[in-house]
Image (tube, rainbow, N blue to C red):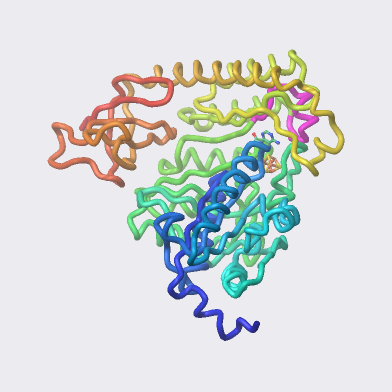
Amino acid sequence: MDFSEARPAVGVGRRIYIETYGCQMNVVDSETVMAIMAAEGFGRAEGVGDADVVLLNTCSIREGAEQRIWHRLDELAALKKRRRSGMVLGIIGCMAERLAEQIVAERPVVDVVAGPDSYRSLPMLVGEAVAGARGVNVELSKEETYAEISPVRLDASGVSAFVAIMRGCNNFCSYCVVPYTRGRERSRDPETILREVRELFDAGYREVTLLGQNVNSYNYELPVHVNFPELMRRVAAISPQLRVRFATSHPKDISDELLEVIAASPNICRAIHLPAQSGSSRVLAAMNRKYTREWYLERIAAIRRLVPDCAISTDIIAGFCGETPEDHAETLSLMREVGYEFAFMFKYSEREGTPAAREMADDVPEEVKTARLTEIIALQNELSLESNRRDVGREFEILVEGFSKRSQEKVFGRTSQNKVVVIPARSAHAAADHRPGDYVRVRITDCSSATLQGEQIV
Ligand code: 5AD
Ligand code: SF4
């Protein structure tokens, strides 16, 4: 079938719903897909129930993530069978990239399979599916950055948005599947980034998070060279009323130049997510992280020196190949030494095709991984609580994001350090309730390990 003429109509009268799993990059990718589909006439469904097209945007980072998606796929397959009107079911994202053949062979119910670099072909693939054929495209690209596409923002807060500035990863940490599912690193044209951020600010957004798998290796060569510190400087200059965050940084690229830009820009948030993964230099070498414990701690010292009020968070993997009790103890001591504000903590999960899976034995028994992870989580809870206690009595400016889950009488916002603060929706000083997008000066009155309580000050 020739779609060159039929294509513009493919979406008209059809509604699409995207269910997103995994990282923040997937959130932006879903928003980008929505923009691509909207340009072809597709409307937006409220949920699976009123959708003609359902896409699962998937994650492969750990075995558990994939299992959850297989399970969801079976639920949707049952739903599709019950429906008389038909439904196009698609798998997109990292799992589509990694397991395209298996999905096609084992799940005839799936009509569309598209990897992270082939979203521009989705209208055509869905069109083929509507016509009764299966559409598959999992080609990776060296150039695709979806640079000029303005994502359709799917979460309704209207305050904070993610902006993808680079894609892919060249680091090949030995445990990680990302370089294979998302391909090589490439940076997006800075002009398109600045235009998108300006549009967001004009639409009322007050915070952007610049995203990349390895965001601080951002590097755009032509016509003029723009590196990550320079990009940050330009984004921060858009407005002092716009908060700028970035994630995720690789420790090898957290340069003094970047820290100096942060120090000089009050609207660049005082929060750096700097995954250590392990505190043992021996394990870090096996992980191919390209730094040692000492080198990492030197970078932490540089952050403390140049941006003294900066919160630091991390990712930790428990039970990597060959990890001894001594290595694990070094991870705990690193966490204490840094005093992380926050951490994402995982058990090592072997991923087929990675160097660790090919060359190393996944030899830490499951119950040992669990025990180590439990210790890591308990320690982080202590560290988070200590950090929050230090904030009690201090003053911060928060950006209000919405109403508290527990009570309509309270709103929540974040400090520059990315900590959540809950305050009364109306205070004695204010004529009206605080609204999402408002900046409010607060004093912290109380805390738990997860949140701070505060009150407005003038
Ligand atoms: N097993 C466990 N955790 C992993 N991560 C990446 N790959 C794996 C894996 N195979 C973690 C790392 C990374 C975060 C996004 O996910 O900590 O920083
Ligand atoms: Fe994976 Fe390492 Fe790249 Fe992060 S930097 S995406 S952990 S390979």
Against 276, residue 22 (above or below) is below
Residue 284 lies within the magenta run: yes
Q: Residue at x 71, y 58 (%)?
A: 104
Spot the residue most to the bottom. Answer: 5
Left or right: where does residue 288 sit relative to residue 346? right
Q: Residue at x 46, y 73 (%)?
A: 41
Against 386, residue 320 (above or below) is below
Magenta stretch: give its range. 276-291
Spot the residue most to the right. Answer: 359
Against 277, residue 9 (above or below) is below
Left or right: where does residue 437 sit relative to residue 336? left
The quadrant in which the C terminus is found is top left
Against 315, residue 17 (above or below) is below
From the top left corner, tell me how far across and down residue 37 is, in percent: 51, 68
For residue 321, say whether it is visible.
Answer: yes
Left or right: where does residue 234 sit relative to residue 119? left
From the top left corner, tell me how far across and down residue 169 is, in percent: 69, 49
The quadrant in which the N terminus is found is bottom right
**Predominant secondary structure in magenta?**
loop
Residue 168 lies within the magenta run: no
For residue 150, say whether it is visible.
Answer: no
Figure quadrant, ligand 1: top right
Q: Nearer the viewer, residue 385 or 222?
A: 385
Q: Residue at x 33, y 23 (%)?
A: 394
Q: Nearer the viewer, residue 429 or 297?
A: 429
Left or right: where does residue 403 sit relative to residue 357? left
Q: Quadrant of residue 435?
A: top left
From the top left corner, tell me how far across and down residue 93 is, in percent: 62, 54
